[in-house]
Amino acid sequence: ETGVTQSPTHLIKTRGQQVTLRCSSQSGHNTVSWYQQALGQGPQFIFQYYREEENGRGNFPPRFSGLQFPNYSSELNVNALELDDSALYLCASSPLPGRERTGELFFGEGSRLTVL
Amino acid sequence: SQQGEEDPQALSIQEGENATMNCSYKTSINNLQWYRQNSGRGLVHLILIRSNEREKHSGRLRVTLDTSKKSSSLLITASRAADTASYFCATDSNRGSTLGRLYFGRGTQLTVWP
């Protein structure tokens, strides 16, 4: 059984650019959540996908968008990058259907984005 | 904000000692979880306690939950250098509008010296 994998692990962008981060969920998990973790802070919920649809969103602007594919993998896209977008972006999958209570989340190792 | 807050922000102990971390939150929950994060890496789930439970054990971990005080504690007994990490509490919400979302605190940085 493979765990949650994310790519790339590190990347550097400049202000105004766009970035796509990718996540493969753990085998058998159909719900994927994305979190942003700034340095020294706890993870902040960006959004969650269940059955290829957005299933809840945190306080992030529309330039943060996502996709989920039929194989449950997911992408996080961020347009018009700002310096404050520099953070560790974490993907987490869950075996629970998205419309039930949140249980344990299985996290990937994250993608560290630096915006210059 | 429903975000949990851990206390203390940093904790430094010797191997063999016990480590206690506390978490407070603001609104009603279905469950509370504790996660561990080694520096700059992904989070690993440690334990989940439901709102109708008061105490739970897993190996060297003991978690308590007091819903009347909206607080939880994580006790790590007989700590080891390998326990050095950041520890986060995370709560969900029993409000339907935020299904699937976890609220994390800022974490407690635990350092265990050999």
Image: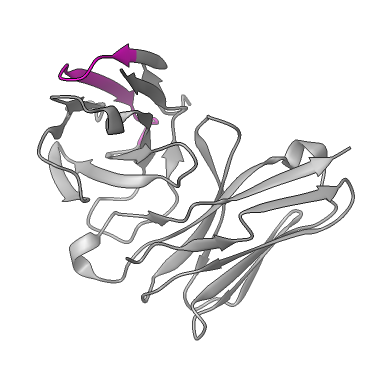
Residue drawn 34% across and 47% down?
A44
Tell me the quarter of the picture where residue A84 sits.
Answer: top left
Residue drawn 21% across and 19% down?
A15
Magenta-tinted stretch: A12-28
- Across and down, in percent, residue A83 comes to 28, 28
Q: Quadrant of the C terminus of chain A?
A: top left
Q: Observer-nearest residue: A3 or B100?
A: B100
- Across and down, in percent, residue A80 comes to 13, 24
Q: Is residue B97 above or below residue A68?
A: below
Tell me the quarter of the picture where residue B81 sits.
Answer: top right
Residue drawn 39% across and 23% down?
A111
User: On the picture, is A40 further left or further right than A36?
Assistant: right
- Across and down, in percent, residue B101 comes to 30, 54
| B2 drawn magenta | no
| A18 drawn magenta | yes
User: On the picture, is A85 further left or further right than A16?
Assistant: right
Q: Is residue A7 above or below residue A75?
A: above
Inspect this view and state whether residue B39 appears.
yes
Q: Is residue A90 above or below residue B53?
A: above
Q: Observer-nearest residue: B83 or A83?
A: A83
Inspect this view and state whether residue A8 appears.
no
